[in-house]
Image: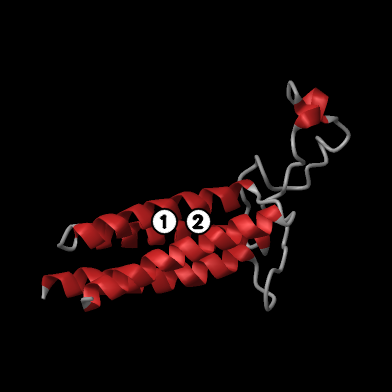
Amino acid sequence: MTHRNRLILTATATSTALLVGAYITEFFGWEPCAMCLWQRWPHFAAIVAGLCALAIPGPAFPLLGAAASATTGGIAIFHSGVERKWWDGPASCSGSGDAMSAMSGDALLPGGADLAPLVMCDALEPFLFGLTMANWNALFSLFQIFVWISAARAGRS
């Protein structure tokens, strides 16, 4: 196995592990907020880029993997700031929610009684070692960017 392919597998496995971890925590009752869900899509794109990069030589797919990791990392950094109240988050999932707190699910949406409760994006929920899932995603995504770019460079030599 080439050095390039080891790097690609490392980056792809990291996205896979982060997604598996997210779905496992969700299975055990840790409901994701909207920004948590947004962070998942670029990981899926990174996995596809990784599979393509293993089959097709050249730097294009590793660079796409780096872009996907940068995207999820950017969302994660923004989400981390929202959780810590450094800046405002999207109105759809942050703030006090006081205006809607007295309303039932039926009043908010048709079929609302059957909907899961809204998880606020600005709720600080430490996950491991005092860091939130968004914090961990940001850290791992920064690592992935480095690995993806290293894979793109390794493909040129």
| Residue drawn at point x = 75 percent, y = 23 percent | 111
Which residue matches tag 2?
Answer: 75
Residue 145 visible? The answer is no
- Looking at the image, which is closer to me, 66 or 84? 66
CB atoms of marks 1 and 2 within 8 Å: yes
Which residue matches tag 1?
Answer: 71
Few, some or many residues within 10 Å of mark 2 (<14, 14–19, 20+): many
- Looking at the image, which is closer to me, 67 or 81? 67
Across and down, in percent, residue 67 comes to: 33, 58
- The correct choice, above or below, for 4 with respect to 30 in the image is below
Q: Secondary structure at mark 2?
A: helix
Horizontal side, residue 59 vs residue 125: left or right: left
Q: How many marks?
A: 2
Q: What amino acid is labelled 1 in the image? A: Thr
Q: Residue furthest front?
A: 1
Across and down, in percent, residue 59 comes to: 18, 63
Q: Quadrant of residue 108?
A: top right
Horizontal side, residue 92 vs residue 42: left or right: right
Horizontal side, residue 143 vs residue 123: left or right: left
Few, some or many residues within 10 Å of mark 1 (<14, 14–19, 20+): many
| Residue drawn at point x = 34 percent, y = 74 percent | 146
- The correct choice, above or below, for 17 with respect to 41 in the image is below
Across and down, in percent, residue 142 comes to: 43, 71
Q: What amino acid is labelled 2 in the image? A: Ile
Q: Residue furthest right?
A: 102
Measured in 3D between alpha carbons, the distance from the residue under mark 1 to the one under mark 2, in whole angstroms, is: 6 Å
Across and down, in percent, residue 62 comes to: 26, 62
Residue 15 visible? The answer is yes
